[in-house]
Amino acid sequence: MDRLEFIAGEDGNAERIDRYLAERCPDFSRSYLQKLLKEQAVSVNGKAVKANYKVQSRDRIILEIPEAEKADILPEDIPLDILYEDDYLLVVNKPKGMVVHPSAGHMEGTLVNAVMAHCGDHLSGINGVLRPGIVHRIDKDTTGALLVCKDDAVHRDLAEQLKEHSIKRRYRAVVWGTLKEDQGTVEGPIGRHPIDRKKMAVNYKNGKDAVTHYQVLERFGQYTYIECRLETGRTHQIRVHMASIGHPLLGDSVYGPSKNPWKLQGQTLHAMVLGFRHPVTGEYMEFTAPLPEYFSELLDKLRKR
């Protein structure tokens, strides 16, 4: 059983405990946190509390997370575009429309199902039964390079590199509007949207620090083709940050306009470059995932306008 502990600061004063936990535990759904509260798995200063408990400054909050039940994830023979593989890890070029790992109601057709068929039992187990081998994620409609680990020690090392921001990640994106500066940096903590819990937002109250650097590659009047470099890896980071400065990603109906003039399937975002130090050999390795066909075709159309 895992245990999470929080000491409430002034910012959590008089906030309901369910909302307080939802802000600080973005990996857990609101309904799952409610379930833990009902099961008396949340205590404040040593006493179990209900969902409507109002958090007070200096409260000691403990969340007991039960062991995950064994998930029935089946290997599926789904083709993988493998950029690199050795005995310890692989780098996969994820296609558009593929979810990285299973979740309730989505146990099939994910990258994990495909990787399980490819690697068998040789996948790290650190991230739990639903995420074997998965070190980091990219969104369903984001394409590109993703690390998968076959070994727990290798997984820990790469997770630490991620935490230290030493893994090189370069993304390509097309955004709405014309970016006037050739390069820039967006800084703003990212957390759950205060009203729409399915979305993320720049949240100065409860967000985590996030930094995105961008560089203009081409301008097409109404649109701009950019490269983004991540210092941090928050959920939906590039999508939220670019929308926050008035330049949402083309095709992103969650953070941008609902109109879709180019009939795109989700955001135009590609994880192009991934560089890291190999945990076993110590060698620096860098991989480039080629732009997907839809992205290249879109650029051709924009250049011809």
Image (cartoon, helix red, strand yellow):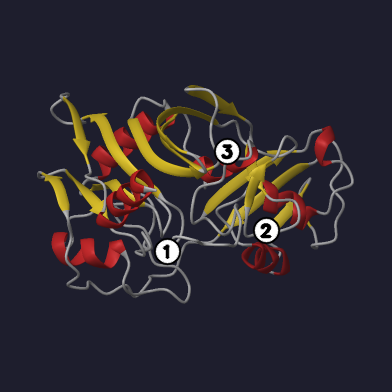
**Measured from the top left, where is residue 102 in percent x and y?**
39, 67
Above or below, 213 against 240 in this view is above
What's the mark number on residue 165?
none
Discs 1/3, front: 1
Distance between mark 2 and mark 1 Cα atoms: 22 Å
Identify the element where label 2 is drawn.
loop
Mark 3: which amino acid?
His
Discs 2/1, front: 1
Distance between mark 3 and mark 2 Cα atoms: 17 Å
**Measured from the top left, where is residue 5 in percent x and y?**
65, 42
Above or below, 212 against 96 in this view is above
Front-lying residue, 93 or 119: 93
Whether residues under marks 3 and 2 lie with C-beta atoms below 8 angstroms apart, the answer is: no
What's the mark number on residue 197?
2
Whether residues under marks 1 and 3 lie with C-beta atoms below 8 angstroms apart, the answer is: no
Regarding residue 58, the answer to whether it shows in the image is: no
Above or below, 35 against 49 in this view is below
Residue neighbourhood size for the residue with mark 2, other residues' Cα within 10 Å, grouped as few (<14), some (14–19), many (≥20): some
Discs 3/2, front: 3
What's the mark number on residue 265?
1
Identify the element where label 1 is drawn.
loop
Mark 1: which amino acid?
Gln
Q: Sequence order check: which comes first, mark 3 or mark 2? A: 2
Identify the element where label 3 is drawn.
helix
Front-lying residue, 90 or 290: 290
Front-lying residue, 2 or 167: 167
**Measured from the top left, where is residue 206 in percent x and y?**
71, 39
What's the mark number on residue 241?
3
Q: On the image, which quarter does residue 289 sit in? A: top left
**Measured from the top left, where is residue 116 in percent x and y?**
21, 64
Mark 2: which amino acid?
Arg
